[in-house]
Amino acid sequence: MKKLNKAVSLVCSAAMAMAMLAGCGNAESTGSAAGGGTFKFGAIGPLSGGAAAYGNAVCNAAELAVAEINEKGGINGYQVEYSKEDDELNAEKSVNAYNTLKDWGMQVLVGSTTSACSIAVSENTKADNMFQLTPSGSAVDCVKYDNVFRVCFSDPNQGIASAQYISDNNLATKVGIIYDSSDVYSSGIYQKFVEESAGKNYEVVSAEAFTQDNNTDFSVQLQKAKDAGADLVFLPIYYKDASLILTQANTMGYSPIFFGVDGLDGILTVENFDTSLAEGVMLLTPFAADAKDDLTVNFVTKYQEKYGETPNQFAADAYDAVYIIKQAIEAKNLTPDMSVSDLCEALKSAMTEIEAKGLTSEKMTWDASGEPNKQPKAVVIKNGAYVSAQ
Amino acid sequence: MSSFLTYLISGLSLGSIYAIIALGYTMVYGIAKMLNFAHGDFIMVGCYIIFSVSGALSGNSFIGIIAAIILCTLLGITTEFVAYRPLRGAASPLAVLITAIGVSYFLENVALLIFGADIKSFSSVVKWEGLSFADGQLRIQGVTIVTIAISLIVLVGLQLFIKKTKQGQAMLAVAEDKGAAALMGINVNRTIMITFAIGSALAAIAGALLCSAYPSLSPYTGAMPGIKAFVAAVLGGIGSIPGAMIGGLVLGIVEILSKTYISSQLSDAIVFGILVIVLLVRPTGILGKVIQEKV
């Protein structure tokens, strides 16, 4: 019996050793799937519905950037895995999308695309201490937590950027403003613009308001700007009201430079609108697809090849976002085996130290508030299309 | 001085739009004694019809306007028949008022469903540039002159219609006392239906002029001008046809001048403040008749 016992124990130990080996093998493969050997980036945006154009731009451009990075050997030698989820422009669905990505093993979030969704998701990223970089969430509250940063200007900061741009490029000596006092977006930009205008090389000569209950007749606002001699009229408003302003300015024979912010983007798509009225209108935007620098040409060509359309500013913001995260990870020499929370802490401090270069700016820096600091860019409408202003 | 005149002309052009909308409001109120809060939305429907028809006919706005007048008239008759007539005998006059608000939201939402929320740019139906004085310093737009002319024609036409025709006399009788009119052999329902038909046709015309002056068309295009025109009608004396004209012009001029000389943010507060004061001093409006209640 002793012999048999020995034989049995031998077989058993062999089997155990086999099992252990097999176990090791298993552990290794699950380890890598859990993020041991690759960074996992997730993106969220409205991929269906009315705002699908924004979400697809963000998710496609992030995908493109990740593919480029992997081709060139990844980040710190580690490849990047990428996944995207649809939020249908709905804050609750955005949180669901975030949870789905978290289950997948996401370590860093590029998103959400829109402000309301981004704010909703930031409640969860804050709780999980996950690093979040929103490409295009422009509402002030998007970056209220210390783990959230953004690539685009915040709404009110577009006022500061516009004032800088007008002053840097000597666009005007006298500036008139027409803004919507019933809208927080418009009045926020207006206030920052006026504050920033103090001491600049132009003078604000008229600032007239309208409200959503009183947005049909702009003759008074335009006439006042004209009487005050404004050679540039700043329009921190949406294109819906701006199209009427342009028409009425044309009727009264007043043709200053009209300068707008991202709310004006879309004026060329108004059905039946006479686009010749918008000729010469300038608007602050981080990205013009016709720019001739290598970075833009490379991005636009690849994007067009892969997705069959010309990328917009959302795409550019998201493309930059991925490269910004790459740079921050490299700055701190981070590895994928770190916990989500450790990565977040390291990235938070890295963000305030790096100086990024991208499609949307030659030089971007951040402070701990999460707001970017970068050179504003503008486009001008020529022959019914956007062209870089310089 | 010349800038004052410029602002005055702006006020006139805004006021003329209010006036022509107010004419439709006041006529329906004067005869059917009900506030058709959906009037502003009939205007919006008219605008969309003109926009679609003239778009389909490569810019032939004349046929568009004719189509809008016909379809708006039909819409007015249908609305009256379906939504207002069954409630005319209701215990509370509020029932019809609330229904009118319901019709207003119904039309806005249907338009939202069909045409979407995106604004459309309306091509002016008035091709005439207008007059300019003092080396182009002062300009009166063609659409302003046409609006004032059409308002005057409508004003005179309505007065003649009411005073000189049998149907008009029937309307006056219904306005005075529905029960007595019915006893005199007047078909009250038919009379009120005709009133709505005329009011809705006026809405189509007002829509064409509103969108020509301010060429941005959305499902809410008629809402705010409708409310302002209602204020104009009350200011002028609701039920009084010349009162609507005067109320509209006064409201437009006051709005523009207060925007100019007081504050562009406060203009609505001032306009509605003036309404309150006028009604305190003259509760029946500028041209309103004081009706003695007989007990």
Image (cartoon, rainbow, N blue to C red):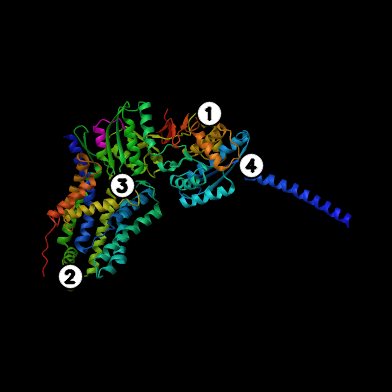
Q: Position of residue A83 (x, y in %)?
A: 57, 45
Counting residues from the N terminus, which is met first, the one under dot 1 or under dot 4? 4
Mark-to-mark CA distance, 2 and 1: 84 Å
Give the crowd class for mark 3: few <14, some 14-19, many >=20 residues within 10 Å: few
Looking at the rendering, the stretch of residues picked out in magenta corresponds to A222-233
Which residue, given by chain and number where applicable, does mark 4 sit on?
Answer: A36
Quarter of the picture holding the N terminus of chain B: top left
Q: Residue at x 24, y 35 (%)?
A: A224
> Are the residues under marks 3 and 2 on the same chain?
no
Which residue, given by chain and number where applicable, does mark 2 sit on?
Answer: B181
Q: Residue at x 20, y 44 (%)?
A: B12
Which residue, given by chain and number where applicable, does mark 1 sit on?
Answer: A294
Q: In the visual, does A204 lie left or right of A309?
A: left
Mark-to-mark CA distance, 3 and 1: 43 Å
Write down the chain letter for disc 2. Answer: B
Which sits in the foreground, B25 or A233?
A233
